[in-house]
Image (cartoon, rainbow, N blue to C red):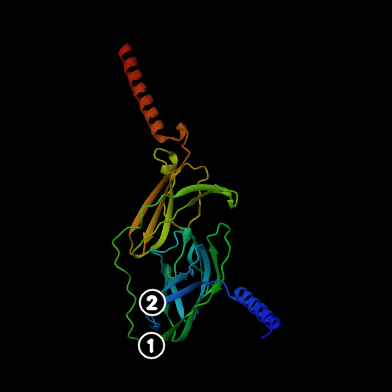
Amino acid sequence: MTQFTKKNLSFFLLVAGCWLLVATPAQAAEVFFGANSKEVQVDTKFEVGVFLNAQDQSVNAVEAQIIFPADSFVFEGFLSGNSVITLWIQQPKLISPGVISFSGIMPGGFMSQKGYLFSLIFRAVETGNATIAADQEKVLLDDGEGSETSISKAPLAINIVEKSSSPLFTPLYDPVLPEAFEPQISKDPNVYEEKYFLTFATQDKDSGVDYYEVMESGQFGSFASLLKKRQWVRAESPYLLQDQSLKSVISVKAVDRAGNERLATVNASNGFPWYENYIIWIIILIIIGSLMVIFKKFLWKKK
């Protein structure tokens, strides 16, 4: 082989090697699913686990939509105990028929090939083959810039039959309350037109948090505590506070899927003036009444 040919061959191998390095795709993160059985019976509930494969990359945020055939499945709820997502932006929520949306953050980064995000509970309503898949996925790298990583697809095929040997879905026995948490009152120019809002989140590592309720009640001693009806309302974080004067006592209740409740209370930062305190008025009336009695007795003695 001539010297010229050797040089050409070396150049060709160098160019080919560079092309392979450029053409090799980056590691792609993957939102994938798991189920105890891929065959379910009509009119029974079943659980589908949703997982994140970070492909040995450090990631700190994920969002996606879960697509399922609305004529085959009814979405019954979700479980999120032991999720790698510790700060939810939006917990799994049905936003339109057959579409569930979610987003959350893993502060400090997450790196694993099978990170548990949550479980979806469905009820099968029609026989046939059905597919559950992720769509519009975004997984952000923990690189300080929030760079998006590439995504690969991994749908789950389910066969719905009239009869099946698969066990029916049974909720976990859960005697444990959701974890303690501290709601926070905040104000941000980009949220609720810079009005005060409440943020809250907790975890339940057994059956998962089912829902939250919020109650704003008057502070003890205020007329508002007598007039304001104490009523719990279903809520999601962030929650726009009804009392923008911050004179209320705010209670947040986290309820898990077994019915266990954890209560957290926030004392509003603002107090209320003395003239709105009915206890002070009661004391004043008692003093005035006592003085009137004494004065009458004094006048009676003079007569």
Q: Which amino acid type corresponds to the residue marked 1 in the rendered image?
A: Glu
* Element under disc 1: loop
Closer to us: 276 or 302? 276
Q: Can you identify the residue that label 1 sits on?
A: 162
Closer to us: 205 or 192? 205
Residue 303 visible in the displayed image: no
Q: Position of residue 171 (x, y in %)?
A: 33, 70
Between the C-alphas of marks 1 and 2, the distance is 14 Å
Outermost right residue:
4
Residue at left offset 58%, top offset 65%: 148
Residue at left offset 30%, top offset 59%: 176
Question: For residue 73, which quarter of the picture?
Answer: bottom left
Local crowd size for mark 2, using a 10 Å CA cut-off: few (<14), some (14–19), many (≥20): many
Does label 1 or label 2 sit earlier along the sequence? Answer: 2
Closer to us: 154 or 46? 154
Residue at left offset 38%, top offset 50%: 264
Quadrant where the N terminus sits is bottom right
